[in-house]
Amino acid sequence: MKSKLLLCALLMTLLGTVACSHEHPAGADRFRAATLDPGEDTAGGAAGADERPVPASDRNVVVVVVDDASDVSCAELPRFLPRTSALLRDRGRCYEDATVTSPACCPSRAVLQTAQMGHNNGVTRQIDAERLRVEDTLQHQLTEAGWDTYGTGKYFNGTSSWLYESGERSSGFLTSDFWEGSKYYGYPLWNDETRQPEVQTDGVHTTTRTGRFLRSFIADHAGGERPFYAYAAFKAPHTDNSMQRLVQRDPIPTEANRDRPVPPFRWRPEPDTSDKLPIYQEQLRPRSFYERRYEARTRSMYDVDDEMGRTFDLLRDLGELEDTAIFFVSDNGYHLGENGWETKGDPYGAAMDVPMLAWLPAEFGKGVVDTRPVGLIDVAPTVYDLLGLTPDHLVDGHSLLDDERRPGTFFELENEHSEDLLKEAGRSPGRVPTWAMYRSGRSTYLEYYRHDGSLIRGEFYRGDDYDENLLWPGNRALRPDEETLAWFRARLREGRTCAGTVEQGSANPCP
């Protein structure tokens, strides 16, 4: 086991002297739960940690989630995430065709944590976080299996972080530092002494603090008796919602990156959206608006990239990098005018496609570009596989360590009109009806539904840009034949009730 003195020396270099203190004053950059007795009930709600079994593996795991990041190709990634790419892309694996099952923050994070579709984990809307069964989460199973688990940053919309930080509700993590995710500065953190959240006035950017908390946890647990699992959820590049509830301001980068040059903006509005629902048939903003937002989003991702680089350096200095699996994902994508749309919640490519990278040389290879269709739903099954564990519940995703290529992909999202949705994403997503979609190869079939479940319309696309609905009357010459449509409709119906996988012997497996 590495010496505590060595850890403190390294921390003093990387985080500052406060990192070696065993106190946690308001606003300190040491993770809050460091002072708790491992046998106590902690913020994660797991008691008696000292009596847990010996873990089945010595491997550590770090999962990093960013908020609303646009996808870019693996080839272009170094222009947007240079430090992250240097390790996870150049020496790890980049997934070229990664998607989310449900393109909204809360449902997507529930999919990531449970490896279950929303219709199976109960979280189909932003307001459904309290319906999640914590026993079905990756962090809960790793905690029970003996890993030291920690979560920091933004947890879920639709529920208060303070319920978890106070210990009133379990997140499944042994320890955590979650906070409300609407602001880049002046956000609250939970104070254990006062048992209240307190607004931070120290001027520390939320991205900076998330990175510091993550590294503090890693440094405290590196070389310990148990391996660790760390989940870091950055707010960036989400809009800043620090003003009135419906004001969606541009992300606020740190001073270090506020004026940093960014790659040129690619303006890709759909020329004609008359083949889509009326909500997509008007360009919501001028190009100048989207270009300004793109620049702010890109710079806020540079902040995340800086924190990732510092975290890689720490893992390397502590001798843990080669034994730590790292996953980097976004909870959904983001529209900047594509398909006549802004933000997310819709079934088209800009909202569905996300960056996704993985690191563990012995398993993921070095410099691999993986073109298989994969998704956030596959992260937890991969972690179980890496650590030699069997999930104790049905999962709907597949291990990325397998060479199998899924025959198709199912997607879904339920419409909602809620205060949480308005605060988190503005008015646009609430205008999108409930929908379900099935994609196979380059062909995609989509259905929109009314609140009573009846069909509004179907759409069919070939290609990745979703610019031409082949079921629109103006495209009769391009319409797929009825046999093709019947096949896609059958796959979509199966997807809406699927549960489990072929590997688990499920009767109606998810693709």
Image (spheres, rainbow, N blue to C red):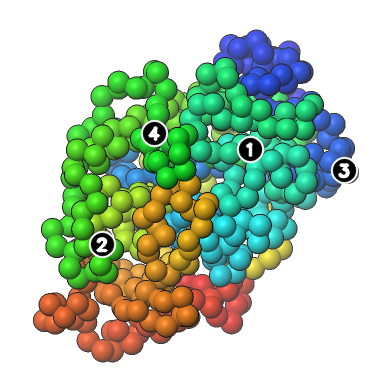
Q: Position of residue 427 (x, y in %)?
A: 39, 53
The residue lying toward the viewer, choosing from 250 and 100, is 250
Q: Which residue is mark 4?
A: 251
Amino acid under label 1?
Answer: Phe
Mark identifier at residue 129: none
The residue lying toward the viewer, choosing from 318 and 308, is 308
Q: Position of residue 300 (x, y in %)?
A: 39, 31
Task: Of the two numbered discs 3 and 1 on the same chain, state the one appearing first in sequence.
Answer: 3
Q: Which residue is mark 2?
A: 280
Question: Is disc 4 placed on a helix, strand or loop?
Answer: loop
Task: Of the two numbered discs 3 and 2 on the same chain, state the one appearing first in sequence.
Answer: 3
The residue lying toward the viewer, choosing from 335 and 99, is 335
Identify which residue is drawn at 56% across, 30% down: 187
Mark identifier at residue 48: 3
Q: Measure the C-alpha gap from mark 1 to mark 2.
A: 35 Å
Question: Is disc 1 placed on a helix, strand or loop?
Answer: strand
Q: Measure the C-alpha gap from mark 4 to mark 2.
A: 24 Å
Assess disc 3: are there few (<14), some (14-19) or many (≥20) residues with their C-alpha within 10 Å of its C-alpha.
Answer: few
Amino acid under label 2?
Answer: Tyr
Whether the residues at callouts 3 and 2 have beta carbons within 8 Å, the answer is no
Would residue 285 be visible to someone looking at this image?
yes
Q: Measure the C-alpha gap from mark 3 to mark 2.
A: 53 Å
Q: Which residue is mark 1?
A: 178
Q: Which circle, 3 or 4, is nearer the viewer?
A: 4
Whether the residues at callouts 3 and 1 have beta carbons within 8 Å, the answer is no
Task: Of the two numbered discs 4 and 2 on the same chain, state the one appearing first in sequence.
Answer: 4
Please identify the quarter of the rendering in which residue 490 is found.
bottom left
Q: Measure the C-alpha gap from mark 3 to mark 4.
A: 41 Å
